[in-house]
Image: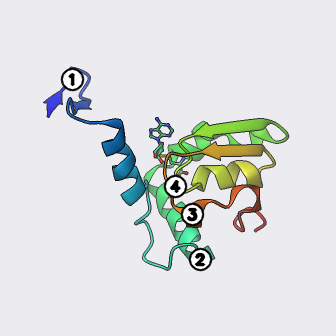
Amino acid sequence: MAYASSGTTVHPDATIDGVRRFCDQRPCNIRHSSEPIGTNVYFDQVEARKYMVGPHIPDFAEFPRWRGKKVLEVGRGIGTEGVNFARAGADYTGVAPIRLAYFDYGQTDPRVSK
Ligand SMILES: C[S@@+](CC[C@H](N)C(=O)[O-])C[C@H]1O[C@@H](n2cnc3c(N)ncnc32)[C@H](O)[C@@H]1O
């Protein structure tokens, strides 16, 4: 492991497959709740914790601004931002290299109709 001058950690031996495996096994924020994955309480807790730790994210994303617009998120993870774009009225599409079927709700994600 090496450290670039910007403070970024560099992993010269990392491979695309290695990154994909890592992301498959532990998508961002998946452990923000100990409730059963896929339940409303699980997603509510993940979202609450994520935006407590990263309150800048909703400010940066400006969800309401994208109402009626097409939004493409490359690297949608478990969909916390995707759901908020959709709730705010965006025509949201998210893509991800991860293959966790229980996060593949697309436009029918039950969190959107809350
Ligand atoms: C910070 S997370 C995004 C979190 C997401 N906004 C959410 O609400 O959960 C970054 C995501 O980018 C994905 N990613 C990493 N490299 C990628 C690539 N080359 N192409 C597409 N997605 C990628 C990772 O799998 C990860 O889920």
From the top left corner, tell me how far across and down residue 40 is, in percent: 62, 75
Bin the neighbour count of mark 3 within 10 Å (Cα to Cα): few under 14, some 14-19, many 20 and up: few
Q: Relative to residue 89, is residue 95 drawn left or right?
A: left
From the top left corner, tell me how far across and down residue 49 is, in percent: 47, 62
Q: How many marks?
A: 4
The amino acid type, in three-letter code, at marker 2 is Thr
Tell me the tag on residue 101.
3
Does label 3 or label 1 sit earlier along the sequence?
1
Q: Is 21 situated above or below 108?
A: above
Measured Cα–Cα span from mark 3 to mark 1:
36 Å
The amino acid type, in three-letter code, at marker 3 is Ala
Residue behind mark 1:
4
| Residue plotted at (50% across, 79% down) | 36
Q: Secondary structure at mark 4?
A: helix
Q: Secondary structure at mark 1?
A: loop
Does label 2 or label 4 sit earlier along the sequence?
2
Residues under numbered marks 3 and 1 in contact, where contact means CB atoms less than 8 Å apart = no
